[in-house]
Structure formats: structure tokens, C-alpha cells
Amino acid sequence: MKSSSSPLSSVPIPTPTKFDDKFGSVSESYKIFRPTYNDELYSIIDSYCDEKRDLAIDVGAGSGQATVRLAKYFKKVIGN
């Protein structure tokens, strides 16, 4: 009989830690001038996901701008 548990159910979720600002004095300029992803990207992600949205992992998150937007669609988002 096939198990219904997710392979991720046994993966420990790390406790959030203090944000380590790697951009320093240029962070505000980076935030202002960095191109953003349009709403269509998030609509596509939304359409591909089923109703169980426990976890999203944003690999290569950089400043975390997309990570924050993904939090609208998932219970927990990890940016790395």
C-alpha cells in the first residue's frame, strides 16, 4: 500500500534567524532599482500549486523580494 505522507514531512524546518544584510550601504538603492517580477509570474506559480501549500523554498533568493511575495501563497516560505 502506498504511503500518503509527503517526503518533506520528515524534513526539519529551520527556525528563522536574524536577517543578515549582505548589501550594506547600497541596500536601499538595490531595492529601488532592482527589476521586480511581474504579477503574471506569481499567477503562474499559483495556478501550478494545489491547495496544500505548506512550504515554498526560494532558491537564490538574493534580497528576498520574491520570497516575501511568495508568502501570500504559502504557509511558510524559506529564502536561501
Image (cartoon, rainbow, N blue to C red):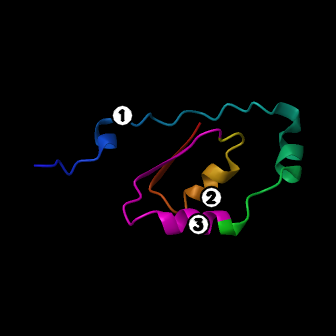
Tell me if residue 32 comes above or below residue 72 in the rendering. above
Which mark sits nearer the N-terminus, 2 or 1? Answer: 1
Residue ID at (23%, 48%): 5
Q: Is residue 44 left or right of residue 1?
A: right
* Quarter of the image where one finds residue 71: bottom right
Label 1, label 3: how far apart the Cα atoms are:
28 Å
Dot 2 corresponds to which residue?
Answer: 69
As for residue 59 lying within the magenta part, the answer is: yes
Dot 1 corresponds to which residue?
Answer: 12
Which mark sits nearer the N-terminus, 2 or 3? Answer: 3
Q: Quadrant of the C terminus?
A: top right
Dot 3 corresponds to which residue?
Answer: 44
Residue ID at (44%, 56%): 75
Label 2, label 1: how far apart the Cα atoms are:
23 Å
The answer to whether the residue labelled 2 contacts the one labelled 3, judged by CB atoms less than 8 Å apart, is: no
- How many residues crowd mark 3 within 10 Å: few (<14), some (14–19), many (20+)? few
Q: Amino acid at mark 3?
A: Ile
Tell me if residue 46 comes above or below residue 36 in the rendering. below
Q: Is residue 38 left or right of residue 52?
A: right
Tell me the SS state at disc 1. loop
Q: Is residue 62 left or right of residue 53?
A: right
Mark drawn on residue 29: none
Q: Which residues are magenta?
A: 41-60
Label 2, label 3: how far apart the Cα atoms are:
13 Å
Say which of marks 2 and 3 sits in front. Answer: 3
As for residue 53 lying within the magenta part, the answer is: yes
Residue ID at (62%, 58%): 69
Residue nearest the observer in this picture, 20 or 38: 38
Tell me the SS state at disc 3. helix
Q: Amino acid at mark 1?
A: Pro
Q: How many numbered circles are shown?
A: 3
